[in-house]
Image: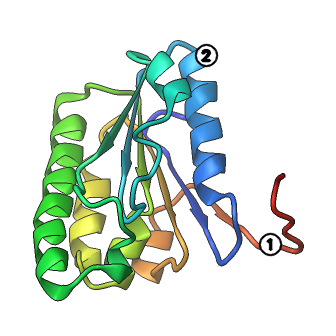
Amino acid sequence: MAKGSICIYSGEGRGKSSAAIGKAVQAATEGRRVVIIQFLKGKGLEDSEFLKRMEPDIRLFRFEKSDENFEMLSQEKKKEEIANIRNGLNYARKVLATGECDLLVLDEVLGLVEKDIVDGGELKEILENRGETGIILTGINLPDSICILADEVSKIETVKFKVWE
């Protein structure tokens, strides 16, 4: 990924986060520092022993406290989680402002716009302040206002899915 570029994985298909993590691992093998912030993932990858072994080259953050999927939470819990999500976005701003990584992955951040947790203009402002940090975004729906900022957009479609045994 070129310095300061924006890559987006969107669509209804499976594998958007996996593609982003693959690019993160590739960047780390090239000596780049990577930060991954996950949103709306329930437990997500936070407990992944594999990614913990990748530190400090790849650092993973999840600011949400609930292990449940956001959609399953009560309105009261959603309000609490929205505050935690905002902390995650503020951390993303800090990472970009300080240049503490070469690649920032905002996993499922497009879902924040879709669910009206974050305004599309706010996400656009974060992206516009990236400097030379590359950014990868994932999510199902991609607003046009974010799409036009991207250097690379991949639409992921699942043609067939079989559960691993």
Question: Residue visible at 19% across and 77% down?
Answer: 78
In this figure, which residue is indicated by the disc labeled 1?
158
Secondary structure category for the residue under label 2: helix
What's the amino acid at mark 1?
Thr
Residue 12 % position (x, y): 66, 78
Count every numbered label the image shows and give the total.
2
Question: Residue visible at 81% across and 62% down?
Answer: 163
**Which image quadrant for residue 124?**
bottom left
Q: Does residue 54 show up?
A: no
Query: Few, some or many C-alpha atoms within 10 Å of disc 1 (few <14, some 14-19, many ≥20)?
Result: few
Q: Is residue 164 left or right of residue 156?
A: right
Which quadrant is home to the N terminus?
top right
What's the amino acid at mark 2?
Thr
In this figure, which residue is indicated by the disc labeled 2?
29
Question: Residue visible at 17% across and 29% down?
Answer: 98
Residue 24 % position (x, y): 55, 34
Secondary structure category for the residue under label 1: loop
User: Which mark is in front, 1 or 2?
Assistant: 1
Question: Residue visible at 16% across and 75% down?
Answer: 77
